[in-house]
Image (cartoon, grey):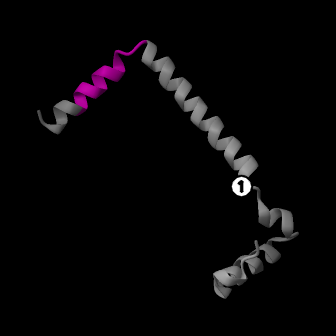
Amino acid sequence: MNLKEIFHMYVDGFRHMTVGRTLWALIIVKLILLFLVVKLFFFPDVLKRDYDSDAERAAAVRHNLTSGADSIPG
């Protein structure tokens, strides 16, 4: 069995699914919601919170990139 036959076997299998489509849709929706929740609650926009302008944010990023890991707070 070569790769082309294996690929067509999977394509045909996904094409003829009935319940599987609903399950895949549910999995995709759950993953999207999970990543949105993780991003919103565990990765806040620290630059927007701590600095008022884009120039201040850029200076802070530049400073942290050039000063090394020993100056990172926390």
Q: Is residue 55 left or right of residue 25?
A: right
- Secondary structure found at label 1: loop
Residue 28 image position (x, y, % from top left): 54, 31
Q: Amino acid at mark 1?
A: Phe
Residue reaching furthest top? Answer: 18
Quarter-of-image position of residue 10: top left
Residue 40 image position (x, y, % from top left): 74, 47
Residue highlighted by disc 1:
43
Residue 26 position (above or below residue 50) = above
Q: What range is drawn magenta here? A: 7-18
> Residue placed at 59% from the left, 30% from the top?
29
> Residue placed at 85% from the left, 71% from the top?
53
Residue 29 position (above or below residue 48) = above
Residue reaching furthest bottom? Answer: 67
Mark 1 crowdedness (10 Å alpha carbons): few <14, some 14-19, many ≥20? few
Q: Is residue 38 left or right of residue 48?
A: left
Q: Between 43 and 59, which is closer to the camera in this rendering? A: 43
> Residue placed at 70% from the left, 80% from the top?
64
Q: Is residue 15 left or right of residue 72?
A: left
Residue 40 position (above or below residue 60) = above
Residue 43 image position (x, y, % from top left): 71, 55
> Residue placed at 50% from the left, 18% from the top?
22
Residue 60 in the magenta stretch? The answer is: no
Q: Between 18 and 41, which is closer to the camera in this rendering? A: 41
User: Which quadrant: the N terminus?
Assistant: top left
Residue 35 image position (x, y, % from top left): 63, 43
